[in-house]
Amino acid sequence: MVRAILGRALSSLLVVAGSSLLVFVIMYLLPGDPVDSLIDPSSATPEQIASLRHQLGVDRPLYVQLADYFGKLLQGDFGKSLLNSEPVLPKIVEHFPATLALAAASALLSVVAGVLLAVLSAVHRNRWIDVVARIVGLLGISMPTFWSGILLLLIFSVHLGWLPAMGSDGWRTLVLPAATLGLIGAGFIVRMVRNSMLEVVNEHFIVTLRSKGLSERSVMYRHALRNALIPAVTMIGMLVGEMLAGAVVIETVFSRQGIGRIVADAILAKDLPVVQGVIVFSAIVYVLVNLLVDISYSYIDPRVRRAA
Amino acid sequence: MRESATAKAVLQKRKWELPALRSSGRRFELSRLFVAGAVAVIAFIALCAIAPQWIAPYSPTEMLADSLMQAPSAAHPFGTDYFGRDVFSLVVYGSRDSLFIGLMSVVVGGLVGGTIGALSGYIGGWFDTILMRIIDTLMTIPGILLALAIAAAMGPSLTNIVLAVASSAIPGYARVMRGQTMSINGRPYITAARSIGVSRFGIFRRHVLPNSLSPLLVMATLGIGSSILAGSGLSFLGLGLLKEIPDWGTLLSQGRGYLTVAWWICTFPGLAITLLVLAVNILGDWLRDRLDPKRKEA
Amino acid sequence: MERLLEINDLSVDFHTRRGLLRALSEVSLTIRRGETVCLVGESGSGKTITSKAVMRLLDYENGRIAGGRIRLDGLDLTALSQNELRSLRGKKMAMVFQEPMAAFDPVYTIGYQLVETIRRHETRSKKEAWEHAVSLLARVGIPEPRIRMKQYPGELSGGMLQRAMIALALSCGPELLIADEPTTALDVTIQAQILQLLQELKEEFRMSILLITHDLGIAAEIADRVVVLYAGRVAEQAPAAELFARPHHPYTRGLLDSVAALDTEKGEKLRSIAGSIPSLSALPDGCLFHPRCPFASDKCRNEAPPLISRNGRAAACWHTDKLLTATNAEKGSARQEIELLSEKLILAEKNPSASPFESPEASPDLFQVSGLRKFYRLKGSLPGRARAHIRAVDDVSFAIRRGETFGLVGESGSGKSTLGRVLLQLEKATAGRIRFGDRELTGLRGAALREVRKDMQMIFQDPYGSLDPRWNVGDIIGEPLRVHERLTASEKKERVARLLESVGLDASYANRYPHEFSGGQRQRIGIARAIALSPKFVLADEAVSALDVSVQAQVVNLLQELQEKLGLTYLFIAHGLQVVRHLSDRIGVMYLGKLVEIAPSRELFLRPAHPYTKALIASIPSADIGAKRERIALQGEIPSPARPPSGCRFHTRCPLATARCKEEEPELRTIGSEHVAACHYPL
């Protein structure tokens, strides 16, 4: 068991290294010179460009750049912003809690609402609750967050004035963004758990349970649901990724000071070290969460536990 | 003696009972209605993309100086914007880029991801291990972040947005295709083909590939929806093209500043995105139910 | 005796896409207290539907009781609500299912699922219920029940799970036990154990049993009365002894013939039922059996016969009398044959060294296998470390002669299928040599190997999975031709048409797709593909096991006919010993990766030398009612091939094992002419 976990942890480490490399490749190797975005190449003198290149370190051979990049990453140095020379990591750490709060709140919302709807929908197949669940599922994966967020904002802040339209202080500012993101997550979860439930309900052992005289409630909630939730646990890992990505848009819509907003601004300003830093950081978070999910998975599912 | 005891037990246990699970004919018609609606929406939007001039009442560049930011009315069903452009016409013209991004990203992502997945699943061994590690790595970067980074690094252009959205979708396609290829490769008819003496590539081309495609097809259909969302998301964040005719994401992003005074500028492009994606997803679900034998209802 | 279950004119409808389908029509049967009734039928006969109707589990599966009454102990089950039924299910009537592996919830322990049931129906404390469950597990023969209680279903073997399932069914002392094909998914030796257990428990718990099976042998073994279903109707019902002695319905007769004939020796054509089971959506008019019935008349074609009772039994046939006359006539001639055979046997007893049966002329070997091994590395064991292996095939040497049928039998896990696949080079041997004709196969790769494949082909177990669903029949059968021969489209079409005809199918089927055919027809398509290149050798791996009894005999006949016509050599792998006996010239018996005995077919069945062979033969349920006997059931289950026992691998289950067997591995030794066995103390 311990060995299996260690193995997983080691491969997670490799994956993080891989994604850092990938980010480096995207940032520096794809067509498009990072210098172009900082100064207008048509008006700048060649000397200016050269000195800027030197300053950025992009005039060095590739392998030196790469070694430098990984060496610094290992020391926790994510580089400095091109715009104001602020170090990247402290900035991320400072703004991460706001994003974490958003991601956690919306993940919680989507799990609770999603699982509840999915189960009711599968148990009361083809009744009104099922129709509602299916519609929520479809809308969840079909509405762009920047639009549903704006709609909520329009209704609850602009017209009703119940909740603040922007900011990242206090729980009241969290409600609308979390609801927006939560709807997406709930959509994914409803669809997944509902399908999973409908498959489990067709398994042979459900017939056995009924033949034992168990009540429908026991059959559905104690047995079918537990079996159906096992594949859904892996969804939680993916959900965190979705929530982090969603934060980029949502924090822009609701003007929250989180790392999503930072990266969105940095991309527009071509501030590559910041973009790179946030992506590597979120990859680490993603990998960590999935490692935890994997470990807990083997506790939830006896079949996986034996295989480990 | 025994009977009466049982009968008594039976009577005592009349309690709250969940409604019986029965299929009714109603749901079937409902989903049929959904599919018909979806087809109509897609057909209409496709027409908008192909021949916007037939549908839009105004030119998207025409600025009506006397009617700035007018609320929806008979003359302007979606209102007008801050330049006096007709929002309905803008939405009609904007469909082209949105649809193009959605379709092309799926084609590119599906082809690349599908090929990777199929080869990885069929060849197996070290080849599979290495490819899957790369895919795992790609998956650690949430789709839109990856797309953002690529789009940012390569600069705004329609091709780059397509490439960005497509590459963020590759891991998903690769995984599904790999799983399906491996599952098909384990079927007895593959062993049968081997025992006949069909070559390894022949088996792949004639048996494995054709039988592996349907889940990819379903995923690609649903993928059109998410690609449209991702593409318009990029535009919304400002990575869109600064063209005369804005796409839906850009339209929304530009209208955001006027939210408190002109809600319609944001609302209708968003509605268009939602309707299109919804329609595509309904179609995707329908396709999945048709193609997946496990989900076929008895 | 008092009647426990009474089913009167039960009809069941199913909702399907194409509308309402009648799956069961006017079925009546009764079970008295303490009685075992067997419901016999092939696929689509409605036997499982009947059981689910009694449990009223149909309500959950689009099914609807359209008419009739089901009375359990005077209580009308059709009139009760689901809630009321729930207190009867598991308590008064309980059920055991076909797939023990799938019948338990995989994420709860065995103990949890037992206790849950007990506490649902009886007011006991958790501890009492737990203890009761432990004693039940012990009673059904599960070793170390306290440990099993805490295990998950995935950790137990199929046989153990079926025992646990029986314990579950018995946990609240039901009066009626419904067992739906309880042994179909299990090996013969385990099947014998489970059937024995059921009979013991029936006495002990004073239950009645409704046993559903497709296997007439099982019915003969344990039934008091038998009810035969065909396409959703009762064809015949009678006390077991009478039914097997004198069937009153041509269908029952046909079924009996199909099974009993398998006991006969190679060469004769089996009597089989023509055609295939009708689909419920396209039932014939009149008597449902008439398209397949040798006695069918115009009356049968137009009028459905009612179930006519006579002398405590009943049959739905217009021509029972004709059938009886015909049977009497044949009985006489059959008796003569038996006398002839027993004379030969007496001769054999007197002179044991000379085989009484002419052994086939020893023709040259087609396959020579020596020291063959196939190991699989266990998942999770790292290369380089102490390796854990599954020894699927471990040091096997034998030969298959040109033109013969070599049968290979053994329980699942014996390695028989692996051996077949390694012979055909579908998997690479770990060690050893395989000569095919004058070629060494183990070193062949790529194009050279594909070239050899022309001469060795395969027929698969699963008639559904072995044909590519997207290809039409013509392309499927034509595939070997496309690969190995350059033919024009019209030549290919011509060849496919001839192949289809040679397996008894219409040439026009070439344009249809596999899903349009029945299991038997698909198997014929698979056979046509296998013989397309006129191979020398055909491996038939469980080629008839997935088919219905009435269809099995047809396919067996076809295989024999083709062997004669094309001079084929067969390796016939099966767990069904009777089929192997009927088809094979010589038979090899495998146990845990080892060949433990090889002998000519008759010799093996008459004088098995290895205790394992003897036990296997004894485990076969026989449809011959006269042969009802104490079964020498083999104790325990086959051990894991990852950790085979020391010495003789069979010693852990062998009634004759001594200390020597534990230490010393027996070699294959000659017992008689053509007869070898690996046993220190051959019988």
Image: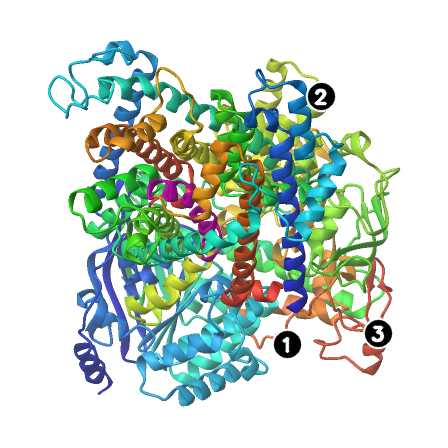
**Residue nearest the viewer, comparing B9 with B243:** B243
Q: Earlier in the sequence, mark 2 or mark 3?
A: 2
Q: Residue at x 47, y 23 (%)?
A: B104
Q: Which label lies toward us, 1 or 3?
A: 1
Q: Position of residue B27 (x, y in %)?
A: 22, 43
- Can you name the residue that lies furthest to the left here? B74
Circle 1 residue: C635
Identity, as a three-letter code, of the amino acid under mark 2: Glu
Instruction: Identify the magenta region.
Output: A233-254
Give the quadrant of residue C426: top right
Task: Tell me which secondary structure the magenta stretch mostly adopts.
Answer: helix
Q: Is residue A216 left or right of residue C385?
A: left
Q: Residues within 10 Å of mark 1 (few under 14, many from 20)?
A: some
**Residue nearest the viewer, comparing C129 with A140:** A140
Identity, as a three-letter code, of the amino acid under mark 1: Gln
Circle 2 residue: C485
Q: Position of residue C580 (x, y in %)?
A: 65, 54
Whether the magenta-drawn stretch holds residue A237 is answered as yes
Circle 3 residue: C680
- Report the Cα–Cα distance between label 1 and label 3: 20 Å
User: For numbered disc 3, what is the local secondary structure?
Assistant: loop
